[in-house]
Image (spheres, helix red, strand yellow):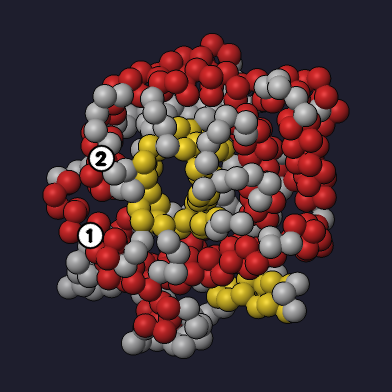
Amino acid sequence: MNKIHYVPAGLEQIFCDMDINLIENLETDYILTNYLYFKNKPIEQWKKYVDIVHKYDKKIIMDSGGFQLIADPKLRIDTKNVFEYQANLSDMGFILDVPLFEMKSINGVNSLIPVTDKEEIKHRMEKTIRNVNDIKNLDKKDSELFLIIHGNTPIEYYDWFQGTKDSNDYDGISLKTKTIPQFIMSFFTVYKHGYKKYHALGTSALDIIPLFYYVFGKTDFERVTYDSSNSLQYSVVKRMLFDIIYLKNKVVHITETEIQKSCCECKMCKALDYDMNEYRGKPFSKTDLNPNHYSNTLTIHNSNVMNKYNNFIQMLAEDPKELKAWSIGRFPKLKIWFEIIDKCFEECDNSEEEFYKIFEKKLGKYHRVFGIQENETRQQNVMEFF
């Protein structure tokens, strides 16, 4: 099967004179950036860095900032400006969508809560369509444009997809994949509509990645990418994903450790000419060109480690039975999800109806499972994977 690409998020700060060449040590093929980081400087100032990224055979995916727009109501984003930056600086961009979240204060803490009101969902879909119409006739150059679909239930995903898919000529689909139910519902909504390119948004759990390979291994896809911000998150707090250990191709461990020179065989660690432990937790001086150099270095290392995990799952996926057996052995709660996925494929392949109708008529018994959230199917965090 074709490769599914792991895409590290949060590498925007590597776009500076001091750190841009660190990209040579990145072992992934793509990076995810956010429009909000670039918008305050002219496109021309960024192009030299983009050329360096391309020189090292890496590609740039640019998010539109729609999620941040919800998290910060005071933020203002111009649709055409987003598109212009994506067209000039990225190989692939997401439309400026209006996600189905809202910021609410719960016990004094601001939290993002799913939007479930039908009228509000319709309103946000209409705003997304207006954003798309604003750029409909603009030249996207060589950049690909991906449609993001949203929803909380199969019918909501269907309505969003049907409402937005004809607004533009999209190169691919961005699926919601923060949880396994989101992935299943968003994927099967578009499964039979002929798309060959997919991106999985915001994947932060190790257990969902084998499901990507299992699901897309049953399709004739051209390219699949998925992003995660774990690499950046652990760098920011000065922690480190260290290494992956293979035991007869059956067991894999990701462990946290102190960072020492030559402790890792990834490209980033091989390229270091200093012991990173010396810089652990210490701020850079004012004379340093980039105070984020330490975190950028860690982020690339972490990305390489996550890429190793992706490659390990890729290897297992050559035999779907072995992939399933290993995944259930490592993550026992995946057993029910493999069963649900098999049932979804079976019913969709044997029916001309849309997925939401199949779900209502034949997969309704799984509705309780699709509704399970944190308390029952808590996604396993990278740092808990030992």
| Element assignment for label 1 | helix
Q: CA distance from mark 1 to mark 2?
A: 16 Å
Q: Is residue 346 above or below residue 278?
A: above
Pointer 1: what residue? 51
Q: Residue at x 28, y 36 (%)?
A: 140
For marks 1 and 2, the one nearer the N-term is 1
Q: Residue at x 75, y 72 (%)?
A: 250
Residue 252 visible in this rendered orientation of the protein: yes
Which amino acid type corresponds to the residue marked 2 in the rendered image?
Answer: Lys
**Mark 2 Cα-neighbour bin, 10 Å: few <14, some 14–19, many ≥20:** few
Q: Position of residue 303 (x, y in %)?
A: 48, 65
Q: Secondary structure at mark 2?
A: loop
Res 220 quadrant in image: top right
- Give the residue pinned by disc 2: 141
Q: Residues within 10 Å of mark 1 (few under 14, many from 20)?
A: few
Image position of 25 with respect to 373: above or below: below
Residue type, numbered disc 1: Asp
